[in-house]
Amino acid sequence: MKLRKLNKGNSRSGLGIGRSNLSRPKRSQQEMIGFVLIVVLVVVALMVFLVISARKAPDEKQSVEVENMLDVILDYTTSCATVFEPQFDSVEDLIKSCYDNEDCDNLDKMACDYLNSTLRDLMGDLMATESVINAYQFDVVHRDSEDLEDEVLKVEGGNCSGSVQGASVPLVVGSGDLVVRLRVCKEA
Amino acid sequence: MKAQMKIQQMAFMIVAVFFFFILVGLFFLAWQSRSLTTNFEDLQKEQALSSIEVIANMPELNCDSEKSLCLDEDKLNVLTGNLSNDYNDFWPVESVRVYRIYPAFSESGKKKCPSLECNYWEIYDSAQELNEQDESKDSSTSHESSQEFSSYVNICKNMKEAGYVYSKCEVGKLVVGARLAE
């Protein structure tokens, strides 16, 4: 036993290249690799955290509620008759008349001007009954066969704070589509 | 001494990594539960809206079988009158009310229909019915609460002008009270 210990001691100290001397750089290399791995792991986890927390909410959320609101607005019967009185136009008809640059026969007003003021009044009254809605934007755009959009009408009001919900309805006209979009801002 | 230091270093590192992953896990759980709550609320809202659509499309209220979310003003006037008592067992909800939103006739709050320049129809209210039937009953024993859901609707009326019949539609709001079990 003593002899074995002696031999061991000799082999280490005597030759100067003992096991501890050999393994020191290897062990430190291992430690470094371990440390780097942990750092990489932490950085990856932080990146995931940042990506999730910084990911923005979608700009506009499609909503059944707003879709119903838009359908109801489009069916509202206005006081404008573009053909003859008492065939009064609904908002939907008036949007088409506005696109065709027609006027209200019974009111001596352009369809677009009348539509603009009616929508402003209507949306104002809707906002007054719905306390969570603080702003709205009503757009009508013409989309041609090449999907190029051209603004026909834009009515907006209020100051937007909170989440945006929207809905759109396509109306068929001679050359392409008229897309009616309603966006409302709802307080969280 | 060196070995002790190494063990300490290692232990601290393991504890730090452990806490870090615990924090990440907690964040993930919080985020998951938040999205779950949002999804639940959205689903509840959608369900309520579809229930409102069912009520609005009932032939007792609907103005046209082809049109959705459209109420007949004449039917509303009839149901608000004495006939409404016969329908008390019919409604699958706690209350049914309709408000005229645009054009707003009455500047000073609600004015019950049928009357001139009115803006409000009370079709059904179970609380009122209960009060009328039995005032001695203690409602506090009930473990149910009521919540109101609403949707915009068209209130349409057939008009005749210069021999020409047309449908005039206004904007209204259908408010339905549903009983929720607590």
Image (spheres, helix red, strand yellow):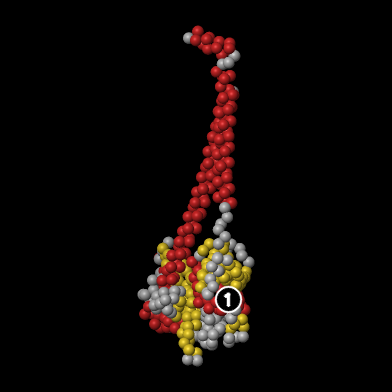
Q: Is residue A34 above or below residue A59?
A: above
In-front residue for pair A96/A53: A96
Q: Residue A3 at x, y = what percent?
A: 50, 8
In-front residue for pair A157/A17: A17
Q: Secondary structure at mark 1?
A: helix
View extreme (right): residue: A159
Residue A48 visible in the snapshot: yes
View extreme (bottom): residue: B162
Q: Residue A166 at x, y = what percent?
A: 54, 66
**Disc 1 chain ID:** A
What residue appears at the point 51 percent right and 73 percent down from the top-left corner? A172
Label 1: few (<14), some or many (≥20) within 10 Å? Answer: some
| Amino acid marked by disc 1 | Tyr
Q: Is residue B75 above or below residue A8?
A: below
What residue appears at the point 41 percent right and 63 percent down from the top-left corner? B181
- Residue that carries the numbered disc 1 in the rendered image: A99
Q: Residue A106 at x, y = what percent?
A: 58, 87
Left or right position of B76 against A23: left
